[in-house]
Amino acid sequence: MVANNPGTRKDPLPVFCFKVELSLAGGGGGEAFFKSVSGLKYETEVVPVREGGANDTTFSLIGATKWSNIVLKQGFTGNSALLKWREEWLNGTMNRIKTGKIIQLDTALKEVAKWTFVRGWPAKWELSELDASKSELSIETLEIAHEGLKFG
């Protein structure tokens, strides 16, 4: 039987305490704060293979690993560094993220988990619907395509 000792217990982490650090390959970057971060996932394809003569099974081989886009959301202020970065891409100044870090904090704001992604670029920018019948904040969303995600 496991003792319920509060000193060794690992409680689930709150989702509201996090920060994002971006380091651009051409220099620059910094720390940014967002309303939400999603896309911390990846999967490896399963390639089904049938072998001649083996009619009772399909073998599952390992395929390519697919990295989901990192999705950052924040309140739109009218002066968006995310939108400027996306527009630079459209104009040919293709400055990738050398490394990006999503850092989860505990309630004392100490780092408890970190995900690092590499070679990111702004794949999509979007502004929330402008609707005069609603009293919501305007939210901008940036999707960052990347080439790998690592925990730790």
Image (tube, grey):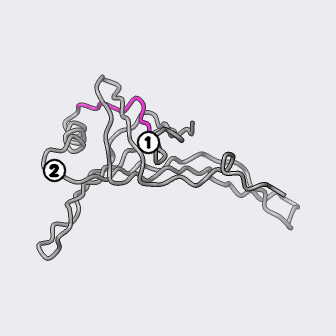
Image position, residue 113 (x, y; %): 53, 41
Q: Residue 144 carries which label?
A: none
**The C terminus is located in which quarter?**
top right
Q: What element carries label 1?
A: loop
Asked if 80 appears above or below 139 in the picture, the reply is above
Magenta stretch containing residue 103, yes or no? yes
The quarter holding residue 88 reads top left
Say whether marks 1 and 2 touch (CB < 8 Å).
Answer: no
Task: Give the residue pinned by disc 2.
Answer: 77
Region in magenta: 93-104
What is the CA distance from the residue labelled 1 to the residue labelled 2? 26 Å
Q: How many marks?
A: 2
Image position, residue 121 (x, y; %): 35, 39
Considering depth in this image, is 133 or 89 the residue closer to the camera? Answer: 133
Q: Residue 109 carries which label?
A: 1
Left or right of 42? Residue 78 is: left
**The N terminus is located in which quarter?**
bottom right
Which residue is at a point 50% across and 40% down the rendered structure image? 115
Left or right of 37? Residue 111 is: right
Q: What residue type is labelled 2?
A: Thr
Q: What residue type is labelled 1?
A: Leu
Q: Is mark 2 on a helix, strand or loop?
A: loop
Asked if 99 appears above or below 45 in the picture, the reply is above
Which residue is at a point 25% across and 56% down the rendered structure image? 126
What is the crowding at mark 2: few (fewer than 14 residues within 10 Å), some, or many (at least 20)? few
